[in-house]
Image (cartoon, helix red, strand yellow):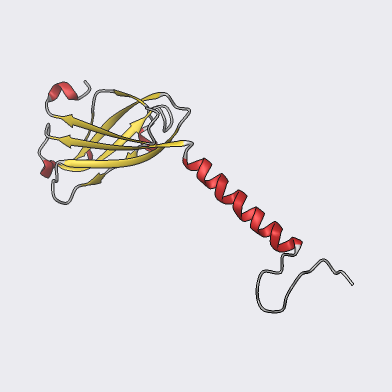
Amino acid sequence: RYSGDRDSGDGRDSGNSADGANRLSEGLVNRAAAAADTDFVTVSFFVRVDVVSAAQIERVDMTSSLFGCWDPERAMVMFRSKKQPEMWGLVLSVPRYVAHFEYRYMLTKGKGSTVMSTIKKISLSANPELEVMDALENGNDLAD
């Protein structure tokens, strides 16, 4: 008599349709996750802030046309280097369909005063990763 189940009783894969469907489903999920990874470009931003002493800066944020029309409330907080306090960084996953975008840095000094950098532009490449090195060295790097 055929029951559709080929279980040998020794703990090996029975080959029944439920197990096959589970393996197929897992394979599709794994392929979808791999495809999703290629839909983004990892962009690592680093900025060296020399225009203001490192001791005066409480935090650095990045705002961008990607985050909602330059709204400072939607800015991303950057991390500060432990070894070089004038260096700040941020890693983003940007959708591959974005060909280019603009961004700027927001420096928050003591007592909450904020200074904005000039607007910077970036074009994404076909590579899966991109590093951007910026420097704010003098007053010309800051917006009026």
Q: What residue appears at the point 16 percent right and 35 percent down from the top-left corner?
A: 49
- Split into 4 quadrants, where in the image is the N terminus? bottom right
Residue 3 in the figure: left or right of residue 96: right
Q: What residue appears at the point 17 percent right and 36 percent down from the top-left corner?
A: 48
Res. 69 image quadrant: top left
In this rendering, the answer to whether 31 lies above or below 130 is below
Q: How many marks?
A: 0
Which one is in front, 126 or 74?
126
Farthest-out residue, bottom: 10
Which one is in front, 104 or 121?
121
Farthest-out residue, right: 1
Res. 72 image quadrant: top left
Q: Is residue 61 visible?
A: yes
Residue 19 percent location from the top left of the image: 70, 63
Residue 46 in the figure: left or right of residue 96: left
In this rendering, the answer to whether 51 lies above or below 144 is below
Residue 18 in the figure: left or right of residue 138: right
- Split into 4 quadrants, where in the image is the C terminus? top left
Residue 59 percent location from the top left of the image: 23, 43
Q: What residue appears at the point 15 percent right and 21 percent down from the top-left corner?
A: 140
Residue 113 percent location from the top left of the image: 21, 36
Which one is in front, 52 or 37?
37
Residue 4 percent location from the top left of the image: 82, 66
Res. 100 image quadrant: top left
Q: What residue appears at the point 21 percent right and 46 percent down from the top-left corner?
A: 80
In this rendering, the answer to whether 1 lies above or below 78 is below
Q: Is residue 111 visible?
A: no
